[in-house]
Image (spheres, rainbow, N blue to C red):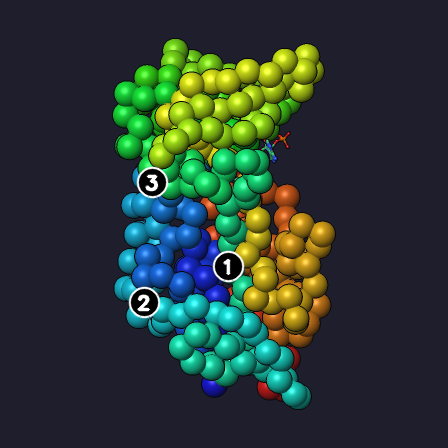
Amino acid sequence: MYDVVIIGSGPAGLSASIYAKRAGLKAVTLEQNPMSGGQVLNTYEVDNYPGLSGIGGFDLGLKFREHADKLACEFKEASVRTVRREEPEGFTVVTEQEEIKTRTVLAAMGATHAKLNIPGEEEFSGMGVSYCATCDGAFFKGKVTAVIGGGDVAVEDAVFLARGCEKVYLLHRRDELRAAAVLQKEVMEQPNVEILWDTVAERIEGDEQVKALRIKNVKTGEEKSLAVDGVFVAVGIIPASDILKDVAECDAKGYLQAGEDCALDTPGLFAAGDVRKKKLRQIVTAVADGANAVTSILEYLQSRTV
Ligand code: NAP
């Protein structure tokens, strides 16, 4: 019987495993694949994590994991299917490999990429359509690409791709970017990035590979085709909360409804990081969640033993 099973090994899960170990809890962190770090691994450069200015996302993920390993935190590679509540208390975490008994569960599953759901997106996925510029950008060296979205990820992707691509179109559905001001400034300084305002993608076209993107200006109604070799979709994230749908409350978008103490309504169940309903989704807030969650878990466990 574990004190806590932490599901997910992104910044929130890794921070929680470090705090849980230091608090003397019997804890295990479940990760779907052997590469800890979550979305951070796909970030080219992280410039807002205090003390580590300009560090590569992959390197930061490794550093988090090395820290946890140094403290001998326990990890298991496991795909979680569901979490079952037991009577009178505690949970069974059902994975594809085994069933794990625990007194509490910390959900730190993060989020996955949202899709555009336009014709051609699915068909050309992996053949010019990508959701990760840092993973796939190198295939488009000297080519023309389009990034869709106006948030931090889209703007970071456009800046990253501009380093190797001949030309990058950044398509945004409004006339104002959502991304942080510092990123907006950076993208506007790139000579080979053209921002197409008020523009949506209607269809991705090609043969064996992407060849064109059909776009529409939402203000003028004008439609045209852009000749592109690659399309990078960066239209937000979807919380990976599905495995908890039987035991926890989610909001309309699927975020788990926990406050700053990371406690969900179900006693013994906690949520941290991008899967939690919150205002600011950054590495630093995910890491803070991991610490807060373990503090709440300790309080919860102590309240059960007195
Ligand atoms: P996001 O901030 O939710 O932005 C999504 C963007 O996609 C928005 O500009 C949105 O337009 C647009 N969009 C959504 N659905 C669309 C559709 N169907 N068609 C066209 N455009 C669509 O998501 P994100 O950029 O993936 O970032 C996710 C979270 O991670 C955010 O909280 C972000 O702050 C954080 N993050 C932070 C950093 C950093 O601090 N350096 C880096 C990466 C990510 P509207 O603007 O019109 O809604």
Q: Name the residue beneath numbered marker 1.
A: 109
User: Nearest the camera: 238 or 277?
Assistant: 238
User: Eyeballing the image, is 211 above or below 166?
Assistant: below
Badge 1: how crowded within 10 Å, few (<14), some, or many (20+)?
many
- The earlier-in-sequence mark between 1 and 2 is 2
The residue carrying mark 2 has its beta carbon less than 8 Å from ligand 1: no
Residue 34 as seen in the image, left or right of residue 24: left
Image point (68%, 12%), residue name:
220
Point out the tag, 1 or 3, that comes first from the N-terminus: 1
Residue type beneath disc 3 = Cys
* Element marked by disc 1: loop
Numbered label attached to residue 135: 3
Q: Nearer the viewer, mark 1 or mark 3?
A: 3
130 vs 84: above or below: above
Q: Residue at 60% across / 16% down in the picture?
A: 223
Seen in the picture, residue 71 relative to 306 is either above or below; the reply is above
| Image coordinates for residue 116, horizontal then vertical, percent | 56, 38
The answer to whether residue 194 of the structure is visible from this angle is: yes
Q: Distance between the residues labelled 1 and 2?
A: 22 Å
Q: Which mark is residue 166?
A: none
Where is mark 2, residue-wise? Answer: 71
Q: What element carries label 3?
A: helix
Q: Are marks 1 and 3 in contact (CB under 8 Å)?
A: no
Dot placed on the residue nearer the N-terminal end, 2 or 3: 2
Q: Is residue 134 visible?
A: no
Q: Give the side of residue 185 with respect to residue 141, left or right.
A: right
**Location of residue 272 in the rendering, given as x and y in whole percent from the top left corner:** 55, 58
Judge by depth and name the residue closer to the eye, 199 or 101.
199
Q: What residue type is labelled 2?
A: Leu
